[in-house]
Amino acid sequence: MLVSCWYLYLGAQSLYREVLNMTSVLQKLITPLCSGPAEPPRNKVTVVGVGQVGMACAVSIVLRLVDELALVDVMEDKLKGEMLDLQHGSLFLKTPKIVSGKDYSVSADSRMVVVTAGARQQEGESRLNLVQRNVDIFRLIIPEIVRYSPNCIIIVVSNPVDIMTYVTWKLSGLPKHRVIGSGTNLDSARFRYLMAERLGIHSSSFNGWILGEHGDSSVPVWSGTNVAGVSLQKLNPDIGKDTDQENWKETHKMVVDSAYEVIRLKGYTNWAIGLSVADLTESLMKNLNRVHPVSTMVQGMYGISDEVYLSLPCVLNSAGVNSVINTTLSHHEISQLKNSAHTLWNIQKDLKDV
Amino acid sequence: MASVMEKLITPLASGPAEPPRNKVTIVGVGQVGMACAVSILLRELADELALVDVVEDRLKGEMMDLQHGSLFLKTAKIVADKDYSVTANSRIVVVTAGVRQQEGESRLNLVQRNVNIFKHIIPQIVKFSPNCIIIVVSNPVDVLTYVTWKLSGLPKHRVIGSGTNLDSARFRQAMSEKLGIHSSSFHGYILGEHGDTSVPVWSGANVAGVSLQKLNPNIGTDKDGENWKDVHKMVVDSAYEVIKLKGYTNWAIGLSVADLTESLVKNLSRVHPVSTMGMYGIGDEVYLSLPCVLNSSGVASVINMTLIDDEIAQLKKSADTLWGIQKDLKDL
């Protein structure tokens, strides 16, 4: 009886030891405490398109307030490679979850979606043709974005940005305050950099806005340019005109040309646009109510009757474009905006399937 | 007829502008170089950034693209030139320049080609920044760090190879993923030669001080039922995988270099696994990754890890391989 009890004891002990050895390192190391499924992300950003611009946006954004980043593209190998490369940097980031996929389900529950996808202009291609090609691409992208993140804010970066933002707004069915174009945010940043350089101060200490259409016909609002509240136009009433001895107008021209120059030199631009998009992201995610020059629906403003997107100073917060600052523009500046609106609408009205 | 500038601004300080205190130079504006540059800018580590390369158009384009982002950065001066004078007074110089391995090319041949490139680069760096710390990223990193040290004439504590800093980061990410925690909460070092023959130090792997090896004495061996050894293999393979998928790797290495830069620039005395002049009875002059205390002097000291015989043997073997290549290099 004693012997059988002893053998039972030994058997139990060896079984116990076996079970103990079978528990994994994870089970031995960690005792779970909270039950239930993992929390959904609160500050998720999706970047559509993992080209140079998309990845520059992604990297600039992950070093800020993002708890999940999703990357979407059609090129599956490159997409996976970019995701892995970012994941390998996890130790140095505070973005615990980085996912990617061809399927938009990975983008579910995003607060913000940055759209950088689209075709590039071919040699000799008309703008209308380029836009129509991009509309066809966006028709596949935008509904999917909205399907998985019905409450998101979309930032459109793809060019021609003002038209593509309009296209996105139409295809998404989202209210206009939740569809934003990166617009002249970058033009203004370049303007502030170049003007500040000329004055020997940091870009952030020079205040100046470029509004309207992103690109060649953007409008530098000289009346608003100031340093510490001192209006440059008061110091030099000719500023920005052809009669200006100091030729400040040249600085705006440099802003317009600089994009082309960088493209000529390195093939594309990406860092500056990436940083500028991250700056917009910060205002939106952190509910900051900061004012940025971004592309928004301007129908009804400045006598513009068409449904077009142009850049104006917008107050950005968690709702998206909370409001627009009513900038006092000169007659000349207003007519420039109206011309842009007219040009944009001429292209937009012929677009099919929007 | 006073200009806007004269009307707007009254100068106060006299004398020349202050020289930079935290200047960083990046040599090579390829994908890796630019990823390092952007990571350093986003972390606000430098008050001046200089870029150097031989491809002048691309170099100027990259400089302009970064300058256009000035509004969002706290690095006031970004310069670039083919001429190294633009790098003068740098605290840190990150070297990412070099050629890639051709199909079927021997390692010795690749290294010799890179030596010939470094012969032009390194003396110029030191000429304009004699007090700098050089971080070598170009591959094969351990050999090229040795080459850099020889060509620079700098004391060994000021020449660092990025080494297994990235391998360790990948290791910590892969291990922590399996444990459901953040990479920074899993501690583990990969040392030795960067690449295929790196050494995962399983005895040191721990979470909150709890040694994983104590929980599973077979960890990292072939007898291990849970096959943790596979994680190290994944780390070695992951570089090749990313290269296969997107053509190169850049973001992770860029972030890891920025992390090293932070310790150096801010005099933090943090411990990082980087390539330094070897120890453990290794007689030859080779660079291998060990846990190094990094601060403003460079490699202030090395942590004496307790390695098991097998791990020491692996390090010695790496050292022999590296010396086998180094001894045949010409013009060092």
Image: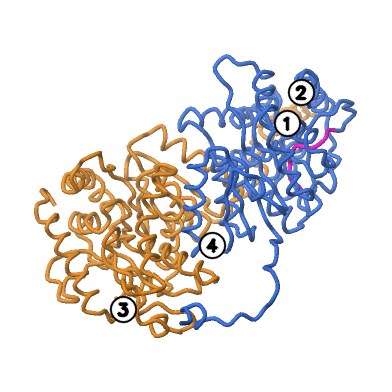
For chain A, the rendered hue is orange
What chain does mark 2 sit on?
A: B
Disc 1 to disc 2, C-alpha distance: 8 Å
Q: Is residue A12 above or below residue B94?
A: above
Measured as percent of width and height from the top left, residue A131 is found at: 20, 48
Q: Which chain is blue?
A: B
Question: Residue placed at 58% from the left, 30% from the top?
Answer: B234
Measured as percent of width and height from the top left, residue A256 is found at: 34, 58
- Classify mark 2: helix, strand or loop: helix
In the shown orientation, is residue B26 left or right of residue A71? right
The residue beneath circle 2 is B322
Decide: few, some or many residues near mark 1? Use Cα within 10 Å; few <14, some 14-19, many ≥20: many
Q: What amino acid is found at the position of numbered circle 4 in the picture?
A: Leu
Q: Which residues are magenta?
A: B271-278
In the image, farthest residue toward the front: B1
- Classify mark 3: helix, strand or loop: loop
Disc 4 to disc 1, C-alpha distance: 33 Å
Mark 2 or mark 4, earlier in chain: 4
Magenta span dominant secondary structure: strand
Disc 3 to disc 1, C-alpha distance: 57 Å
Q: What amino acid is found at the position of numbered circle 2 in the picture?
A: Leu
| Magenta span contains residue A184 | no
For discs 2 and 4, the disc positioned in front in the rendered view: 4
What chain does mark 4 sit on?
A: B
The residue beneath circle 3 is A325
Q: Quadrant of residue B11?
A: bottom right
Mark 4 or mark 1, earlier in chain: 4
The reply to whether callout 3 and callout 1 are in contact (CB within 8 Å) is no
